[in-house]
Image (cartoon, helix red, strand yellow):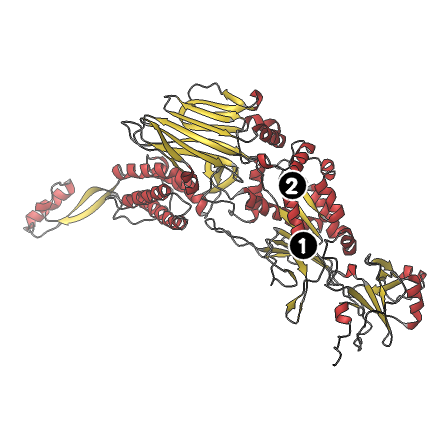
Amino acid sequence: MAVLSFQSADGKVAIKASTAADTANCWRRFSARVGENASRYCSYRSSLAGRLAIALPSQSHRLTDTGEEAAMQWDNLPPVFYETAVYNVNIYLSDIESEPRVVHKLKEVSDLFTAISVGDNKWVLTAPLSFLNEPGIFELSYRYKPVGMAERTDTFAFRVVSPKLDTKDDYLHILNDINREYNEIVFQYLTKTVQSLDKGGRTDNDVIWLSIFRQVIDNYIKAVTYIVTRPHLRETKEVHYSHADRIKRWTPAMAQKYAQSENRGTLDRDYFRHEAIINTCDTAENRFVKFSLERISRRLAKVFDHIRSHGNEITDSELNTLDEYAIKLRKLSQSPLLRRLKAEPLRTESLVLQKRTGYSQVYRYWIMLQKGIELFNGSTQIGTRPIWELYELWCFLKMRRMVAKILSLHFGNNDEIVENPMPMIEPFTDNSQEHTVYYRKNEDEIRLHYQHTYNRTSGDVHTATTDNRPDIVLTIRKPDGFELTYLFDAKYRVCDDNEFSKEDKDEINALRAADYPPSDAINQMHRYRDAIYYGNKVENVRLHSAKEIIGGYILFPGRGDDEAVRNRYFFKSIETVNIGAFPLLPDHNDPDNEGSLLFEHLTKILVGQSAYEQIRDSIPQHGLSYARPDDLVLVGYYETAMLPTILSRRLYYVRTGNERGSINLVPGCEKAKYLLLHNGQNRMLLPLDGNGPRYFNAQTLREMGFSPTGFHYLGFSLKSDTPITTVDIADLPGGRQHTTPYFASIKELQRPHTPAKE
């Protein structure tokens, strides 16, 4: 389906784009996201005047002329390029002498285009273009040589949009949030598309500097060249002492001294003081021009070294262009005007730099190169990191603030929140960060990890096989040592509209074109929960023994009515199996309401439910039901007088907290299968009902006939009061701590088997 057609006014250049994607579906999803501004969201721009036709939604997505005969910019039009689709782009050129080529700093883009000769002096440049995860402005630049004319480069630019995100306001909201915490890590040089941002502030970021440099360098070189040929000169007086025969101009005062010398007869020996007016180029303004040349050349050399290290990604034409700029700057610095001058920064105000032709331009471009980028719409073209990276980091920052807000803690107070600043991401290198924020509330310790890796050697929480790296991990450590772990994966993964599963399409229809989490992303959380275990080393062997991760959730870019989302399968599953998805997308109009359902869930697990209620809400995966490969046993002391009450009530209670004699909970204790009662002499193994512990206060236990001495207890219910006699339990250790309850596995408690002698 054709989506765009451009024809130059002279008829020698034509650009056509088509796609097999369902553009009507793309438009429905996009307009549902953006609203009434969708139909005037985009601008198209060409360096050649001509006519433009695009597939208008109002005309059933048929190619429709925009109505302007010979324009170079077309504003307030709907999009036709979506990041979810692949486009076949063709550039038709006639009356050209040699093979044309597409020019782009990213080698991947330039290499995609194939030049095909289709007749005498006629060529076609063709390529399939995909903008997956890179919404923004794409500049299609092509270089060619018209017959009998100099080689030239023209550009056609258009905006690529995302059906998931408002790629103007909401996207900039993400950039602002990230930039506020981690300055300028969002920018990247080698990108397919760019963002239109404004200049402001100050920066030391190479990506920003190079983006502004490319904008101003041609005019900067023109201004310096003008200065070299028409420099500002300063009049100055030079004092000389010479014999009379060497002086050409005499003032009345000098003539009087000449007469006096002549009368004395000393004319051949006397020197006469005289002044000469000269014009010098050694001015503060010219020294500043040389200073700017040297500083820009030095910075360009540094950036050039970075870029050359990406030789497989960047085109030769881009490297050659930057090298040509470096040569031009070096030649200007060695020009006759500037060669002998000392480079100095400007130390005082100068009207010459503010008003004189050439100098004022140099000063203006120098100031522009010192500025940073303000994250709102403007004219500066700059690349940013892939949107999936930005969305992932933004989700972490959003959760980071949510946890602090829920716990009423404050960043900057090290008694409440501790974190080491995330290292600055190098703008020209790939860099995966691992970052942890520590929160303290009452006696709980909460940790929020970004990009935390679980592997076979990562300690008590590990995997048995390959590395697993969920995006965000939330861990709650209780005062008794019990830990609750929740995994979050941010999935800004845009599926191809032609490859939706039937299940995905049903969800799209149910949500009326709103966003939804891909089904395979939710399945990934099941795989995470299968793969990550708790377990300690026993005799240098890592035991994959403990209960699974309590919850796993997808964070996906969706916005919509909370009640409608509550009825979707991916949200209902959170209550049943503790695996599901939460919509989380920036809303520049109402930032406080971002992720309201996620905020509600975090509140529940951080301050609402007890740890044991959360465990009971989590349905375990098959094969992970037990704390160890063998059944877990609660070992508890009893007083002989209380045994009848324990058996009749079918209840055994243990003290909680940090006091002496309190139970030390371990992961998986809620699934303990047996109770081993002992009193120092006798012991009996009884089955538990498997429903986990319940909370009891002292008063309730007294009413049941027990004699508690503390305040808060956990009670484990017996399935039967009939002892199990098929397990041979070894002698238990004695000592001062033998009355303290603890957990162990059957294997640890069984008497070692001794083979019979033959």
Q: Which residue is mark 1?
A: 530
Give the total number of marks visible in the rendering.
Answer: 2
Q: Which residue is mark 2?
A: 517
Q: In this orientation, which residue lies closer to the viewer: 731 or 635?
A: 731
Residue 442 screen position, x and y as percent: 73, 58
First in sequence: mark 2 vs mark 1: 2
Residue that lies at the very extreme toward the bottom in this rendered image: 758
Residue that lies at the very extreme toward the left in this rendered image: 265
Q: What amino acid does circle 1 point to?
A: Asp
Q: Is residue 591 left or right of residue 619?
A: left
Label 2 and label 1: CA atoms lie apart by 20 Å
Q: Is residue 683 left or right of residue 278?
A: right
Mark 2 falls on what kind of element?
Answer: loop
Q: Is residue 753 left or right of residue 307?
A: right
Q: Residue at x 49, y 44 (%)?
A: 187
Residue 505 screen position, x and y as percent: 65, 34
